[in-house]
Amino acid sequence: MDARKRHYGWYEGKEVFEYVLTNDQQAVFRCIDYGAVVTGIEVPDQFGKRENVVLGFKQFEDYVNDSPYFGAFVGRVAGRIADGAWSAYRLTQNEGQHHIHGGVHNFSQRVWDSRVVKENNKVGVAFSLVSPDGDNGYPGNLSVTVTYYWTNENVWEMLITAETDQQTLFNPTNHTYFNLSGNTKRKVLNHTLQMDAEKYAETNGAKLPTGRLLPVANTAFDFRVPKKMRTAIKERPEGFDTPFKLTGNKKIQLHDPDSGRILVIETDREAVVVFSTTDMEEDYLVDGEKMSSHRGIALETQELPDAVHHPKFRSIVIEPERTYHYRTKYTFTTHQA
Ligand code: G6D
């Protein structure tokens, strides 16, 4: 196992570093201390060819200028909070009247403290930051550490811990977009998606949950058995920007039959938001081509969005004098050639 740290850029007078973690199979995991962004994951296809399977930019400036949260760690709270309102607190309203992804200059736009961590059979980077009392309207000084481990079995483990000195909200996620074809040579339409999710959260025109958890059976939201994204998009042409409540083993599986690559996500979180990138026609380049619909799919493990307004959703309120732990594991394998 090998961990290298190298200069990546400058942000607000601070030097930004990239970490390149290489395991004994020569599979590579890259991340930077700006936003704790995952910038690359290079894993073999069914013939052993290693290629990148996440959306990212070629240069640091693009992450700063106009990133749709590529690979980013999102906080304090992922997703939308209606009217930026929680209790007597007023959070930054950065999507119309609503709050999204922790506000402005949020966790994905800060330089984190970082250090390499090594354990048996895995190497990682621990990123830490302190979000001060009043940050984007949230109360409490919040200390967060997210550690990305890369193992010899091509597993990315994400471990998050948090402590606060006042009651506050916390619902982080990682916003990586996957494309298992390798270096985004194809769109994700031929990928199949399968999820242990019996229900999805109905959303309104502002993409906020209405509070109703509806059965996926006989709807476009049914991914209980593997379904091609092409089929899913045909069933729902506006695409998916949808929270699913996870049940059972809470597994999420993405499979690209063409490259043979398989991603299995396991988590202790309540939900996953599936964002299919439908209608994302952008000017920035990914692998030399303009970003367009279905170049990737974001699978964001988290608690259900806007939980503060829906008592049936798992609470995201955290209390002082406790340490909170959250864990998601991403396993990369292939089917047999
Ligand atoms: C999240 O749910 C949101 C999307 O609506 C947003 O566009 C994206 O982040 C950048 O997945």
Image (spheres, rainbow, N blue to C red):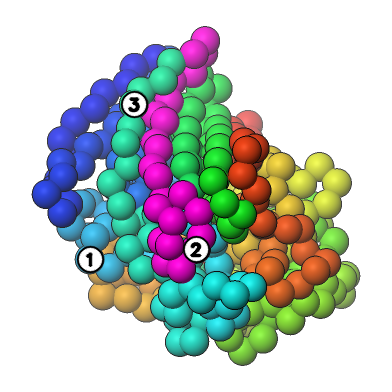
Labels 3, 2: front one: 2
Number of dots carrying numbers: 3
Label 2 or label 1, whichever comes before in sequence order: 1
- Asked if disc 2 is less than 8 Å from ligand 1, the answer is no
Q: Which residue is mark 2?
A: 138
Q: Is residue 120 magenta?
A: yes
Q: Secondary structure at mark 3?
A: strand
Label 3 vs 2, first from the N-terminus: 3
| Residue 115: image tag | 3
Element under disc 2: loop
Chain part drawn in magenta: 119-141
Judge the density around disc 1: few (<14), some (14-19), many (≥20) Cα neighbours within 10 Å.
Answer: few
As shown in the figure, which amino acid type bears the numbered disc 1? Asn
Q: In the image, residue 91 lies at what x, y percent?
A: 49, 73
Mark 3: which amino acid? Answer: Arg
Residue at point 54%, 45% (across, down): 164
